[in-house]
């Protein structure tokens, strides 16, 4: 009798739970859909895309990195082409998504930030989108639909590993997706990889020649197909020694560093680059900060020997 009583109670409890689930389902259909977050940050020119429980939200960046176009040195052709494309975009004319690829520290990210600083008075805005949130690109475009400003979706240091599938979302949005980019949105991406994906020697073994034409294997074609979605490719190469020293001079002038004794500065700047294995704009900027800071210390003061107990 006890076993039968327990089984009856279990069956009754099961029926109650089933009815409760059905009731909750009916209630959920009558509840209003969660409101999609809209812009509420007047005065911001740069935003960061964040993940939320309901999808995504855009947070205004209080102090965006402000660098002028004149500070971007030794990449004049790349600067001119991307600036022209951005002006077309701002004028409501056809413009292309852009991929800036090449050596680290050569000004790819700084160029995009400089364009924002230059053209924000004309309505240019920037939204930084992390790789992990690329699947939300259609949601971001929905947020921007009908806005009067012009938005660059900025993907910095973008690359995908062989087993990642997020690149397919980006590829679909750039070209061929039902959720196409709106007329007030462009994608600017920077990467150290030309095709945004790792390339392996064995994949090139499938390349064949047909009537003198090169036909890549499927794996290579898949990787090339993403970067081809960008209408503009801009290549950034390692700086020569003269270019590196030109950037050093520029930043020393901007930071108010000593203008004399260039031979000494030059030797120190080259030593700095050698230690880091890189002659780049980033190395030049870092050296200029270090040198200017050291020269600004009072003569004879060694910070390492300061009494830190006071």
Image (spheres, rainbow, N blue to C red):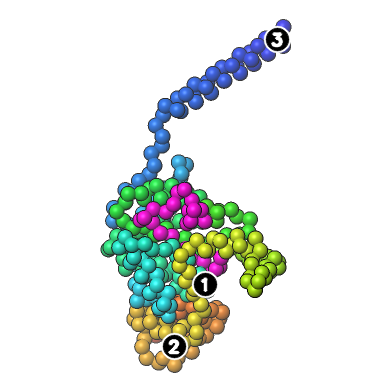
> What residue is shown with label 1?
102
Q: Nearer the viewer, mark 2 or mark 1?
A: 1
Q: Is residue 186 magenta?
A: yes
Q: Quadrant of residue 11?
A: top right
> What residue is shown with label 2?
265
Residue at 45%, 49% (x, y): give it: 179
**Percent position (x, y) of residue 305?**
48, 78
Span colored in magenta:
170-195
Query: Between disc 2 and disc 1, whose residue precedes?
Result: 1
Labels 1 and 3 touching (C-beta < 8 A): no
Labels 2 and 1 touching (C-beta < 8 A): no
Residue at 45%, 91% (x, y): give it: 264
Q: Is residue 172 magenta?
A: yes
Residue at 38%, 48% (x, y): give it: 143
CA gap, disc 1 and disc 3: 75 Å
Secondary structure beneath label 3: helix
In the image, 210 versus 200, the foreground residue is 210
**Percent position (x, y) of residue 232?**
45, 67
Graded by Cα atoms within 10 Å as few (under 14), some (14 to 19) or many (20 or more), the crowding at tag 2 reads: many
Secondary structure beneath label 2: helix
Which numbered tag is attached to residue 4?
A: 3
**Percent position (x, y) of residue 265?**
44, 88
Graded by Cα atoms within 10 Å as few (under 14), some (14 to 19) or many (20 or more), the crowding at tag 3 reads: few
CA gap, disc 2 and disc 1: 28 Å
In the image, 84 versus 209, the foreground residue is 209
**Percent position (x, y) of residue 237?**
51, 77
The quarter in which the C terminus is drawn is bottom left
In the image, 167 versus 18, the foreground residue is 167
Q: Outermost residue, top direction?
A: 1
């Amino acid at each position: 009798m006890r076993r039968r009583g327990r089984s009856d109670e279990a069956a009754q409890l099961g029926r109650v739970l089933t009815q409760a689930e059905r009731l909750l389902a009916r209630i959920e259909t009558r509840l209003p859909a969660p409101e999609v977050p809209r812009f509420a940050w007047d005065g911001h020119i740069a935003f960061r895309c964040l993940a939320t429980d309901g999808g995504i939200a855009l947070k205004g960046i209080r102090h965006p990195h402000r660098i002028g176009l004149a500070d971007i040195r030794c990449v004049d052709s790349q600067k001119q082409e991307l600036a022209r494309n951005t002006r077309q975009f701002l004028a409501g004319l056809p413009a292309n998504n852009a991929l800036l690829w090449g050596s680290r520290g050569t000004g790819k990210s700084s160029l995009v930030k400089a364009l924002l600083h230059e053209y924000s008075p004309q309505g240019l805005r920037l939204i930084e989108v992390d790789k992990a949130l690329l699947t939300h690109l259609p949601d971001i475009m929905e947020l921007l639909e009908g806005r009067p400003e012009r938005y660059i979706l900025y993907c910095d240091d973008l690359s995908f590993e062989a087993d990642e599938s997020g690149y397919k979302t980006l590829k679909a949005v750039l070209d061929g997706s039902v959720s196409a980019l709106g007329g007030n949105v462009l994608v600017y991406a920077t990467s150290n990889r030309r095709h945004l994906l790792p390339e392996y020697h064995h994949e090139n073994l499938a390349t064949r020649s047909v009537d003198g034409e090169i036909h890549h294997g499927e794996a290579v074609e898949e990787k090339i197909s993403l970067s081809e979605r960008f209408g503009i490719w801009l290549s950034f190469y390692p700086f020569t020694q003269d270019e590196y020293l030109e950037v050093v001079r520029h930043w020393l002038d901007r930071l108010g560093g000593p203008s004399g004794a260039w031979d000494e500065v030059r030797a120190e700047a080259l030593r700095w680059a050698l230690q880091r294995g890189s002659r780049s704009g980033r190395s030049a900027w870092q050296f200029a900060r270090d040198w200017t800071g050291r020269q600004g210390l009072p003569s004879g003061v060694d910070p390492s020997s300061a009494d830190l107990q006071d």
